[in-house]
Image (tube, helix red, strand yellow):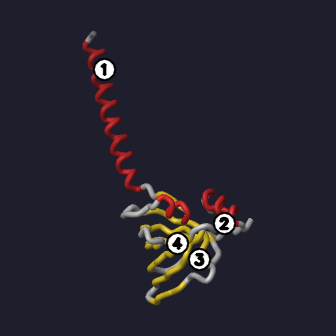
Amino acid sequence: MTDTVKKRLIKFLVSLIIFGIAILIIVYNLRDNIVYFYSPSEIIENNQTGSQIVRLGGLVESESVVSDGDSIFHFKITDGQEQISVKYQGILPNLFAEEKGVVVEGIYMNDRRFIANKVLAKHDENYMPPEVIKSLKETGKWQE
């Protein structure tokens, strides 16, 4: 092998190692930022507890929204099969309403309680995740 071929090979291998390390760093950092989405049935079935932040989506159950004052709200989210009580402290979005689609982000507490730090209200069920749509259609609560 000539010196130029050796230098090119070394440059290529060093570049490949740096590229591999960069990819590993990116994947490792993205792993912490992934937020999984569940319906009430899935989160109860999978027993998703702990400090991992997850998203829970479904319909706000009728006559379940209660305010404790100081912007603390309690309500129930259902997918037609299971329901989970949600506690949220903050201002609810204008589009938040009973029997409407909602996605909350927070921590599931394992006793059918969910502590939310974000509430994302939907103006239309067209943006509902496919898993929740399927569950609502099976129970007959899906509104086209």
Quick one: SS at disc 4?
strand
Which residue matches tag 1? 9
Q: Give the quarter of the image for residue 81.
A: bottom right
Residue at image mark 3: 96
In which quadrant is the C terminus drawn?
Answer: bottom right
User: If you read the primary sequence from the N terminus, does the residue marked by circle 2 or circle 3 appear first?
Assistant: 3
How far across and how far down the image is residue 62, in percent? 63, 80
Q: CA distance from mark 1 to mark 3?
A: 60 Å
Instruction: Say if mark 2 contacts mark 3, CB within 8 Å.
Output: no
User: Is 58 in front, or is 43?
Assistant: 43
Badge 1 or badge 4: first in the primary sequence: 1
| Percent position of residue 125, x then y | 66, 66
Label 4 crowd (10 A; few <14 / some 14-19 / many >=20): many
Which residue lies most toward the top here? Answer: 1
Q: Which mark is residue 87?
A: none
Residue at x 46%, y 83% (from the top left corner)? 72
Residue lying at the far right in this picture: please name it. 144
Q: Which mark is residue 84?
A: 4
The residue tagged 2 is 125
Q: Nearer the viewer, mark 1 or mark 4?
A: 4
Q: Using a 10 Å C-alpha cutoff, classify the residue at mark 3 as few (fewer than 14 neighbours), some (14 to 19) or many (20 or more).
A: some
